[in-house]
Amino acid sequence: MEGDLTELMQKFSLAGNELSGATLELEDLHSGVRECEVMELGPNLFQFNIPNPDDKDKIVEGDPWMIDSQMLVLNRWSEGIEENYGAFVTAPLWGQIWNLPVHWLTKEVGRKIGAMFKEAKEVLIPQTGGKEGRHLKILALTDLSKPLLRGIMVKLAGSIKWVAFKYERCPDFCCYSCGIVGHSERSCKDKRVISRSISENQYGP
């Protein structure tokens, strides 16, 4: 286990929240919507007017939404929201939690690990058999202005383990160098490097 952690530290440039980890004590937007008026307010900024409250709740609570492999960040309308950048930097993403022992595959563990995000909205335990069944799924409210978490160190009764995260339906427009959604590697100004002589992507498809 110690050798695995040493290799991991050499391969990745771990962020503070990934390193500190958690302490464990053990698709179509209009689908089914009767009316929807869309108004463009600015570059990449739109207002959706949905008169029916049930339809509105269905859409807002039905995140995440993807259009042409790009993420659509939704927020309920309020006066001045179009000028509030902070209202559109968080969005829910489905993530998979890997490398968990079988006895850690519980919703309680998923919620504790999900606390590393802004909020864990939902925790699922896949029921499929084989290797694909050995992970948890969480719907996590994620800050898109910061690098996506690749994983965290967790500990249980003195045992330290690296738990890896994989994201489902993540936007294609995500920098594999810094892990921030919204720009390409070519235009990245915050590349992560392992050392002065080594520069390699910290993320992948």
Image (tube, helix red, strand yellow):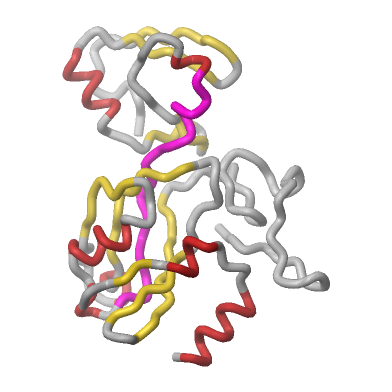
Q: Is residue 13 left or right of residue 128?
A: right
**Which of the pair 5/34 is nearer the observer?**
5
Count of numbered labels shown in the rendering:
0
The question of residue 23 being in magenta is answered with: no
Outermost residue to the right: 197
Give the residue drawn at x 27%, y 62%.
112
Above or below for 42 versus 145: above
Give the residue drawn at x 42%, y 45%.
142
**Which of the pair 98/113 is nearer the observer?**
113
- Image location (x, y in percent) of residue 83: 52, 16
- Image location (x, y in percent) of residue 99: 37, 76
Above or below for 14 versus 73: below
**Which of the pair 42/204 is nearer the observer?**
42
- Image location (x, y in percent) of residue 149: 48, 58
Q: Quadrant of residue 36?
A: top left
- Image location (x, y in percent) of residue 128: 22, 67
Quadrant (top left/top right/bottom left/bottom right) for the N terminus: bottom left
Give the residue drawn at x 38%, y 57%.
116
Above or below for 27 versus 171: above
Q: Is residue 148 left or right of residue 34?
A: right
Instruction: Please give the range of residues in magenta.
Output: 84-100
Quadrant (top left/top right/bottom left/bottom right) for the C terminus: bottom right
Q: Quadrant of residue 152?
A: bottom left
Give the residue drawn at x 39%, y 26%.
74
**Which of the pair 190/41 is nearer the observer?**
190
Q: Is residue 179 left or right of residue 24?
A: right
Above or below for 66 versus 4: above
